[in-house]
Amino acid sequence: PAQAAERLSGAPAVLHHDTRLSEAPFWFAIGGAERAGGGEIVYTYVNGKQIASDMAGTQQGGSSDSTKDGIRTLRDTYPTGKTKRELIRNANTGEASEKRYAENGQILLDQKGRIDGSMLEETQWYMNGQFKRKARFEANQSKVVEEFDDRGRLIESGAYDQRDRPLGTHRLYDSGGKLAAEVVYEKLRVTRRKEFDATGKLVADDEILEDGSSRPASK
């Protein structure tokens, strides 16, 4: 429709759109693309119908959509029948959740939120089972995030606003889990950086200027 074309005019191209558990409608357009090595790309939609493969001629997975006692469950499966993605929306409580799994059954994502699209918490895992990311959302949808390496070791923690822009003090950790640095964000830029040695002693404390240069912070 003309309305959709007008709204999408000039919109940036994206590879993925996260609905944040919301069922609110939105416009989108799909451009043609070629897969390396040839082959037709088949686009996949989660709408209660069968989920097509991403390559023409390959085996297809499936999906189901059921509602019981006000609880709607949407489930996508791999060709093997194992669960790939599960969304649950509880009309009685207003709660919503989404889980995603690797084909071997390893959980990769667990989101908890509300039907209106607001988020409560999110956990991600690596395929080896280690934590990748933990996020706790505030009422205004800013969030406190912990990031981990593939060994499950904490490497960074800090807050982000609703648009994933860093806020306040972010802490960086070494491979032993000890504090290695603190970075302070103000008005969307780094304004201060502290560094610590292996014993936890402060070894550098710099003010970061607008052009990116630094100078020792005033005491």
Image (cartoon, grey):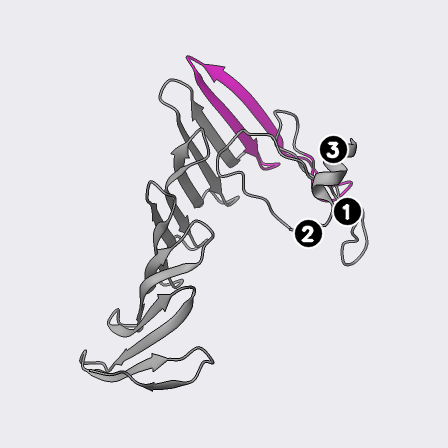
Q: Residues within 10 Å of mark 3 (few under 14, many from 20)?
A: few
Residue at label 2? 13
Which region shows up in magenta? 52-81
Q: CA distance from mark 3 to mark 1?
A: 18 Å
Q: Horizontal and vertical percent for residue 147? A: 37, 59
Above or below, comparing residue 195 to residue 124 in the picture? below
Could you say whether the residue bearing mark 3 is in a helix, strand or loop?
A: helix
Residue at label 1? 31
Q: CA distance from mark 2 to mark 3?
A: 18 Å
Q: Horizontal and vertical percent for residue 146? A: 33, 57
Q: Horizontal and vertical percent for residue 164? A: 45, 55
Above or below, comparing residue 157 to residue 138 in the picture? below
- Type of amino acid under label 2: Ala
Q: Is residue 216 left or right of residue 37?
A: left
Above or below, comparing residue 139 to residue 210 in the picture? above
Q: CA distance from mark 2 to mark 1?
A: 9 Å
Q: Is residue 189 left or right of residue 2?
A: left
Above or below, comparing residue 92 to residue 14 in the picture? above
- Residue at x-position 32% and y-position 77%: 193
Per the rendering, the mark at residue 160 is: none
Q: Which-is-in-front pick, marks 3 and 1? A: 3
Per the rendering, the mark at residue 3 is: 3
Q: Residues within 10 Å of mark 2 (few under 14, many from 20)?
A: few
- Type of amino acid under label 1: Gly
* Mark closer to the chain start, 2 or 1: 2
- Residue at x-position 71% and y-position 43%: 8
* Mark closer to the chain start, 3 or 1: 3
* Mark closer to the chain start, 2 or 3: 3
- Type of amino acid under label 3: Gln
Query: In which quadrant will I find the C terminus?
Result: bottom left
